[in-house]
Amino acid sequence: MVSKRMTRNGTFDILTYKGVEKDIQRLFSKHAVQDENGQVLFDFFEQNGKLVDHEVLSLYHNKRASYGISSLNFSETTRSVFVSDSYASLIFFANQFRARISFEEAGFMVVGAAFDEGLFKKSLEEIPAKTKVNTVFSSSILGRVMDCRVQDLIHERNCSYRLSNGKVHLKNQEAEKTSAEPIASFSLRTYSISQGVLQTVRTFKPRQKGLESFYQVNKQSSNDFK
């Protein structure tokens, strides 16, 4: 059994070493603990609040959670929500864009790799209806499909995605509308155009070539300063 301890001031040695501002660390410390090896463990929960998994951030590695969901800072004043599948990427994103985010009005949601749609929709019920949803998934094809799935669930659309022959094959189950987009250029924007729907979710991706996530961006930056 791994012993865990809360830090006294809501900050973590690893995140401090990686350049994350202390106020950002405290913002994400609600479901986070530090183990005896200095790793940061983020708790993930099932529908009834039972702990089901952890994301683990160590000095050189990040292991994402497979199951459950973890959310924080939801209230009646929430005006924007940032959704990701990695605490690490979300934290490094927030640290990089801290001057552009109104944290007093921002909520955060991290889904497990299995992406339980029921848990996601239940969490959406905790925020005001007009809240702006943003996604912070990787720029990989999986991350881009996740952008689309989040928008589908918000608007209760049932669309399937299949990868074959270098393309993403889409099918709207209700309208029986199909389309195919090249994997290289597929995005929420191209999906919305092909399906004839309005894009309501804003996506954030690293601009650095060859880096798929904000975790990788931070890792590369750390290596550059060694």
Image (cartoon, rainbow, N blue to C red):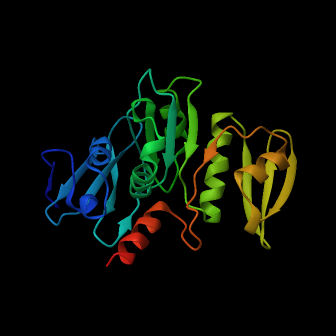
Image location of residue 173, percent across then percent down: 79, 44
Side of 105 where 14 appears, left or right = left
Image location of residue 197, percent across then percent down: 80, 39
Q: Residue at x 80, y 50 (%)?
A: 171
Q: Residue at x 29, y 48 (%)?
A: 25
Q: Residue at x 80, y 73 (%)?
A: 165
Q: Nearer the viewer, residue 23 or 51?
A: 23
Screen quadrant of the N terminus: bottom left
Side of 162 where 213 appears, left or right = left
Screen quadrant of the C terminus: bottom left
How many marks the image carries: the answer is 0
Examine the rendered structure and indicate whether residue 141 appears above or below residue 114.
below
Side of 205 where 24 appears, left or right = left
Q: Residue at x 85, y 42 (%)?
A: 196
Q: Nearer the viewer, residue 84 or 160?
A: 84
**Residue occupying the far top of the picture:** 76
On the image, which quarter does residue 39 sit in? Answer: bottom left
Side of 134 where 77 appears, left or right = left
Q: Nearer the viewer, residue 67 or 196?
A: 196
Image location of residue 53, percent across then percent down: 34, 53
Image location of residue 137, percent across then percent down: 55, 55
